[in-house]
Amino acid sequence: MQATLLTVGDELLSGDVENTNATWLARQLAARGVSVERIAVVPDEVAVIADHVRRYADGFDAVIVTGGLGGTPDDVTMDAVAAAFDRSLTADEDALADVEETVAAYAEANPDREIDVNVERHASLPAGGRPILNREGLSPGCVLENVYVLPGIPREMKPMFESVADEFAGAVRTRTLRTPLPESEVTPVLEAAREELPEVALGSYPNRGDDPNRIKITAESAAAVDEAEAWLREHLAIDGVEGDGGPGSGAA
């Protein structure tokens, strides 16, 4: 399974907010054997978001969009996803009931505060979309064909992703080896490995100071990963395995 991540928000592009959602989601997907092919950050502009959603939905198995949900003027993600699929926005019954319940509970807990929430706006999804209810906040997400739309607030995004996580699965497996050798000695071996190990991808991640350098093996079968590790141990000094990733590895 190949997936892409599309994170929405002017605040990400300006550096005012760190894009932790993309890092967290990439790790979750990798642990499930999914290959993350693209990570993009786009502004709060309907045309730009819609263009990316349209192209990524056509080119990959799944697209996860985060950010831009809510009732403020810059919350345009649902509008953009609807535009990408030429759908209208309509208030979903389940989402509407959930938003109303959340607003009522907040009003009861805060009787001295004036509550002014456009409930219908918050509950509006692209026609035909499946709602993902927001148990930690207000605005729901949705699934439309192969596009998953989640909020940008991490404490809301994470449990909402986990509610649909079983819909993401792939065969990609990884293993990270440690080596005491400098990158200059590792590089020619990795160049030779391209010929010897065509079924795997190898990445070199140099560290500084006393930490060992790392070599990451990525393949679509456990046998290919094992073969690559054995070959590397014949040609390099390997002093340990840092961890495995992919289905059945226990990674998260």
Image (cartoon, rainbow, N blue to C red):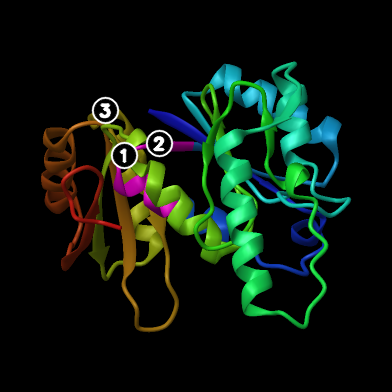
Asked which quadrant contains residue 240, the reply is bottom left
Q: Which residue carries the number 1 mark?
A: 166
Number of residues whose C-alpha sits closer than 10 Å to that of mark 1, classed few (under 14), some (14–19) or many (20 or more): few
Residue 48: image location, x then y, percent: 81, 34
Does the magenta-highlighted stretch encompass residue 34? yes
Residue 140: image location, x then y, percent: 60, 47
Region in magenta = 26-36
Q: Is residue 21 above or below residue 88?
A: below
Q: Calculate the distance from the C-alpha at mark 3 to the C-alpha at mark 2.
A: 15 Å
Does the magenta-highlighted stretch encompass residue 13? no
Label 1: element kind: helix
Do the CB atoms of the residues marked 1 and 3 lie less than 8 Å apart?
Answer: no
Q: Nearer the viewer, mark 2 or mark 1?
A: 1
Q: Is residue 249 or residue 204 the one in the foreground?
A: 249
Q: Which residue carries the number 2 mark?
A: 35
| Label whose residue precedes the other's in the sequence (3 or 2) | 2
- Say which mark, if any, is on residue 23: none
Q: Nearer the viewer, mark 3 or mark 2?
A: 2
Callout 2, which amino acid? Ser
Q: Which residue carries the number 3 mark?
A: 199
Label 2: element kind: strand
Callout 1, which amino acid? Asp
